[in-house]
Amino acid sequence: ATLRALDFVFPKIAFEALGKITLFGVDAAAWPAKAKSVAVFFFFLFMSLRSRIFSPLDNRRPTLSSETKEMQERKRPGWMPPPLAFPIIWSTIAILRATSSLLVWKALGGKFLVAPLTVFLGHLCIGDTWNSINNVDKEYGVATLSMLFVVSSVYVSCYGYFQVSKQAGLVLLPSCIWISIASFLVFSIWRLNGKPSLYPKRSA
């Protein structure tokens, strides 16, 4: 519904008004197209960083202090990156996601409601759900099993982007690599901490 609404509203925005502005020596006629690209980039950047606002679940992210406490309470593999590395890595991944999505949007004629972008937003939803399971509910076994869905969805997204634009697929590829590493990290932590049940249990 969100993508359909964007396809309806976005073309009606008066980007042409920007064509009257000359700035930084850029031809005024080029501003409408540039403004659209910037708006689309920031839309996908926002979705990559804050897609959880659309989720009905509690999607609080771990903080540096909470992650440091977790490291004291639960065993972690020696190769795990320091807590400070995670926000840097995820911020970089978000920029790459937004860039690749912009390339797909351009390649498909400026449409939002298209299969590759829909699948990508589905991947973000799966990631948000996983975050609730792992970081809020603390169902570490279920989160380990659920990583299969997170990894699968990012590879499907990357494949869809690659089919539309090779450049977009290559830009999104680091997301596949990082999430693959993160999934192995989740599995390693699960194994080091008694292998909690992979399936949810009904509370008494």
Image (tube, grey):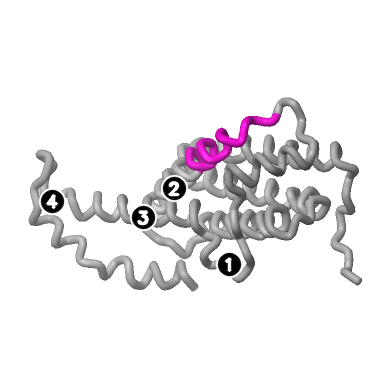
Which of pointers 2 and 1 indicates the residue nearer the eye?
1
Mark 2 vs 1, N-terminal side: 1
Dot in front, 3 or 1: 1
Q: Secondary structure at mark 4?
A: helix
Sequence-first tag of 3 and 1: 3
Residue that carries the numbered disc 3 in the rendered image: 40
Q: Which of pointers 4 and 3 lies earlier in the amino acid sequence? A: 4
> Which residue is tagged 4?
29
Residue under pointer 2: 98
Question: For the residue marked with disc 4, what is the amino acid?
Answer: Ala
Disc sitting over residue 55 in the figure? 1
Question: In front of the other: label 2 or label 4?
Answer: 2
- In the image, residue 161 lies at what x, y percent? 52, 47
Neighbour class for label 2 at 10 Å: few (<14), some, many (≥20)?
Answer: many
**Mark whose residue sits in front, 4 or 3:** 3
Is 35 left, or right, of 95 in this rendering?
left
**Circles 2, 1 touching at the beta carbon (< 8 Å):** no
User: How would you classify the magenta stretch by its main secondary structure?
Assistant: helix
Q: In the image, residue 87 lies at what x, y percent? A: 53, 40
69 horizontally vs 113: left or right: right
Residue 123 falls within the magenta-colored stretch: no
